[in-house]
Image: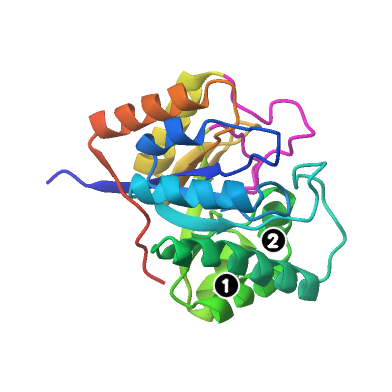
Amino acid sequence: MTESFFVDLNCDLGESYGAYKLGNDEAILPFVTSANIACGFHAGDPAVMKKTVRLALQHQVAIGAHPGLPDLVGFGRREMAISPEEAYDMTVYQIGALASFVKAEGGTMHHVKPHGALYNMAAVTPALAQAIAEAVYRVNPELVLYGLAGSALIQAGQKLGLRTANEVFADRTYQPDGTLTSRRLPNALLSDPQEAIQQVLRMVKEGKVRSLLGADVAIQADTICIHGDSAHAVEFAQQISQVLKAEGIIIQSTQPTA
């Protein structure tokens, strides 16, 4: 019997702010199954949040909060020296902001995925991971916590009894310890769409990814992140969706067990 593979395709959306437009949310939504919507700290504003929630509901895409560090200028990608209590507070605050828009539009929030530097810090810092997981759990224990595959954030969520989704990245390279290559370093991004697609297929079907140093790293792919702010984001989203389906991989919003 042929083994069935299931995977979620998620994308970071709602990252425009005021007069500044980033990404093409409306065009990319038909090809993904989960949307991580910025909550105002690293990007997004009330009008953008409302519009993006409405678009996601129209496309029947699972909605998640995408809380980040309070760093609009750096797009939330610069590390900040925050305490676990601060991480907890800013996570609760941002989930609450988006949850209100979701409720007002008649929807249900599905997940939470930290953004940028907050995400990467929580992946390797157990105290921050625990604070973020506790924030999610106390707001709504039914929410799914998205985190870097095998990271401290996934472990913290599982320890609390949250449902978790191990996330992998289509267009990022990996280190031998399973962490993402820093954007400050060369070769952090895969610019060749075909190379990115092959990496995704291997992660989903074989549970492995080739690190920059050449060694294979074991990895669990519950959900695949594709970035919505790259130059050819829509074309890539369409292409990867078509390839996954052609390979017999079922694309659906994440419904993992704790």
- In percent of the image, x 59 and y 27: which residue is there? 230
CA distance for labels 1 and 2: 13 Å
Q: Is residue 189 magenta?
A: yes
Residue marked by disc 2 = 122
- In percent of the image, x 37 and y 69: which residue is there? 257
Residue marked by disc 1 = 136
Is residue 186 in view from this perspective?
A: yes
65 lies left or right of 199:
right
Residue closer to the observer: 64 or 191:
64
Q: Is residue 221 magenta?
A: no
Looking at the picture, how far across and down is residue 243, in whole percent? 32, 27
Q: Which residue type does callout 1 highlight? A: Val
The C terminus lies in quadrant: bottom left
Looking at the picture, how far across and down is residue 137, in whole percent? 55, 77
Could you tell which of marks 1 and 2 lies nearer the N-terminus?
2
Residue closer to the observer: 45 or 237:
45
Kindly report which numbered mark, 1 or 2, lies closer to the viewer in this rendering: 1
Which element carries disc 2, helix, strand or loop? helix
Do labels 1 and 2 touch, CB within 8 Å? no
The magenta segment: 171-191
Residue 67: quadrant of the picture: bottom right
Q: Which residue type does callout 2 highlight? A: Ala
Which element carries disc 1, helix, strand or loop? helix
Q: Residue 211 shows which numbered tag?
A: none
Residue closer to the observer: 194 or 15:
15
Looking at the picture, how far across and down is residue 158, in whole percent? 51, 73
Relative to 21, residue 157 above or below: below
